[in-house]
Image (cartoon, grey):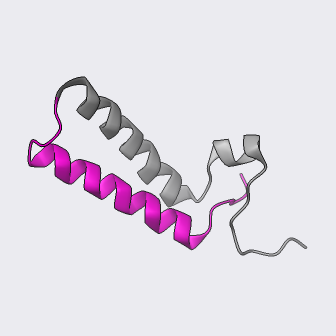
Amino acid sequence: MKKNMGGFDRILRLLIAAIVVALYYFEIIDGTLAIVLLVFSAIFVLTSFVSFCPLYILFGINTCNIKKS
């Protein structure tokens, strides 16, 4: 797996995940919507840590600053 996510993408995904968790913690969102958003947040955190997003490959996106040799 080659990295295809840049630093800005990773930070943005972690920030979104933190906001969703905070909204759930303070009971602003609940029910099915909360579960769906928490699952997406977990996916965001996972993809941020590995710097790889499978959807980026499907759409031909690469925001990683590493130059190809």
Q: Residue at x 52, y 51 (%)?
A: 47
Question: In the image, is 2 to the left or to the right of 38?
Answer: right
Q: Position of residue 2 (x, y in %)?
A: 73, 57
The residue most toward the top is: 32
Question: In the image, is 43 to the left or to the right of 65?
Answer: left
Q: Residue at x 24, y 34 (%)?
A: 34
- Between 62 and 51, the residue placed more toward the observer is 62
Whether the magenta-drawn stretch holds residue 16 is answered as: yes
The secondary structure that dominates the magenta segment is: helix
**Is 44 above or below relative to 30?**
below
Q: Position of residue 20 (x, y in %)?
A: 27, 49
Q: Position of residue 46 (x, y in %)?
A: 46, 50
**Is 16 above or below relative to 58?**
below
- Rendered-image quadrant of the C terminus: bottom right
Q: Position of residue 35 (x, y in %)?
A: 27, 30
Residue 51, quarter of picture: bottom right
Q: Residue at x 74, y 74 (%)?
A: 66
**Is 40 above or below relative to 2?**
above
- Between 52 and 38, the residue placed more toward the observer is 38
Magenta region: 1-30
The residue most toward the left is: 26
Q: Residue at x 34, y 31 (%)?
A: 36
Tally the marks.
0
Whether the magenta-drawn stretch holds residue 5 is answered as: yes
Residue 43, quarter of picture: top left
